[in-house]
Amino acid sequence: MTESAVVSAAISDWVEAGKPAPTVEVVASVALEAMRRVGLRPADLDAVISTTSAMPFGHPTFLTTPAQHMGHRLAGKMGSNGLQVFNVSGACASAAAAFSIADSMIKSGKAKKVLVVGYDNSPRGFYFSFNSYLDTDMTIGYPLKVVGAVNPSYWAMWARRRAYEMGKPVEDIKELMAIIKEELSKNGALNPHARYKRVFTVKEVMESPIVDDPLHLYMISAVSSGAGAVLLADMDTARRLTDKPVKVAASAVGGPLHNEPSPRLTYFATAGGRRAGKPFYEWRKPIEDAYRQAGMGAEDLDFAEVHDTSAFHVINWIDQIMGWEREETDRLIRGREFGRGGKFPINASGGTTSFGEAVYAQALMEVYEIFTQLRGEAGERQIRKEIKVGMATAYGAYGSYGAIILERAW
């Protein structure tokens, strides 16, 4: 099987969401920058894979043709001629899925050079404030309509559930989340592409308004607008294009468990006090798949970029990536060993907490950071130890998951 590698990556600045933006122009500029860095033109590509949104967020059918065909619009805008174009939608895991398709195309020999792009201009406020005409089974709407639950409600229940199962007070996990916010904001303050470039102290986080206890406002990611582009090639081509190719050791995607396409509100709210045998196993499954593909384990990872729409997500991702007892995760966080100078750095980019969530581009921001860190090009936010292998993880609505492992290939 042919090896694949990332040869170039570029992202835009992440900015405030909800404002009109020249979508295709933003995506095209980032895509062309990624190609320019390795001397390629659109005509040199074999395929473009774009993340795509079917949600204009202003109409209850949630259907819009331009958003569904972002890849084709981009290909036409760049001047490419007749190449393969795919559009992929999987909520916050869209870019991870698009990346996996590109990786598979190269490893199967179907393509040699594939561009993966993503863009989102998220709506202000919480997602899915009403039900689509298409969702007659209420898979989206029942939590909102029955109990008024939006995303932070689930995250708060997850956090409380973890504290309960560990026999700890909720204040304990609240403190962990405040530490996470402070440490990741230190990284974001050094990232020129991040929307928030200041440090949020533990005290500030704990004094910010409570949204859903134990989640305070500063523990929850904002929504943003941003774009990313990643260029993949087969290893022979990659070595001709750059002297620092980053090998794709694995790219895995996952789906929901128990035929449950929405967050398992009933499980977390009514499990009757029983301890879960494998909590969040749907998060773990693509990670296990990625380890199998790469022939690696958690002990081989040097750092990770994880999708942190709330500070709780960081805690859970460490649990799942490392596959260890939760107490070890808590010790890692309290000792701040997840910082750039620690033994397992998390989100040296600053993470979603510093960028804000641009749903369909989020995983590309993570890949960009791992690519940049592995090549030693992260400047002030460069991880302070030698690194060879990094993982990116993604989590999206309806049970969309992704796990990508990248490693130095020089």
Image: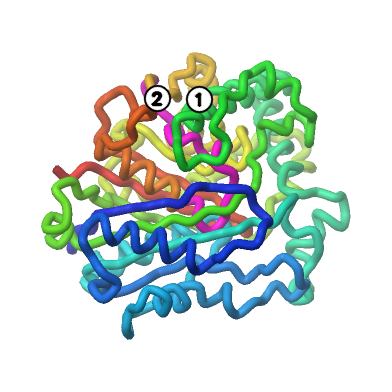
Neighbor class of circle 2 (other Cα within 10 Å; few <14, some 14-19, many 20+) is many
Q: Residue at x 56, y 27 (%)?
A: 198
Q: Over which residues does the magenta segment extend? A: 342-363
Q: Quadrant of residue 173?
A: top right
Instruction: Determine whether, in the image, residue 258 is placed left or right of residue 266.
Output: left
Q: Quadrant of residue 321?
A: top left
Mark 2 residue element: loop
Q: Residue at x 32, y 83 (%)?
A: 81
Percent coordinates x, y for residue 187 in the rendering = 47, 29
| 291 up-or-down from 254: above or below | above
Instruction: Determine whether, in the image, residue 170 is placed left or right of residue 358.
Output: right
Residue 329 versus residue 367: which sits nearer the camera? 367
Q: Are marks 1 and 2 in contact (CB under 8 Å)?
A: yes
Percent coordinates x, y for residue 109 in the rendering = 21, 71
Q: Is residue 28 visible?
A: yes
Residue at which label 1 appears:
186
Residue kind at label 1, given as amino acid type: Lys
Instruction: Determine whether, in the image, residue 3 is placed left or right of residue 131.
Output: left
Instruction: Determine whether, in the image, residue 242 is placed left or right of residue 274.
Output: left
Residue at which label 2 appears:
340
Quadrant, the N terminus:
bottom left
Mark 1 residue element: helix
Residue 384 versus residue 121: which sits nearer the camera? 121
Residue kind at label 2, given as amino acid type: Arg
Residue 112 versus residue 17: which sits nearer the camera? 17
Residue 256 versus residue 227: which sits nearer the camera? 227
Q: Residue at x 72, y 36 (%)?
A: 156
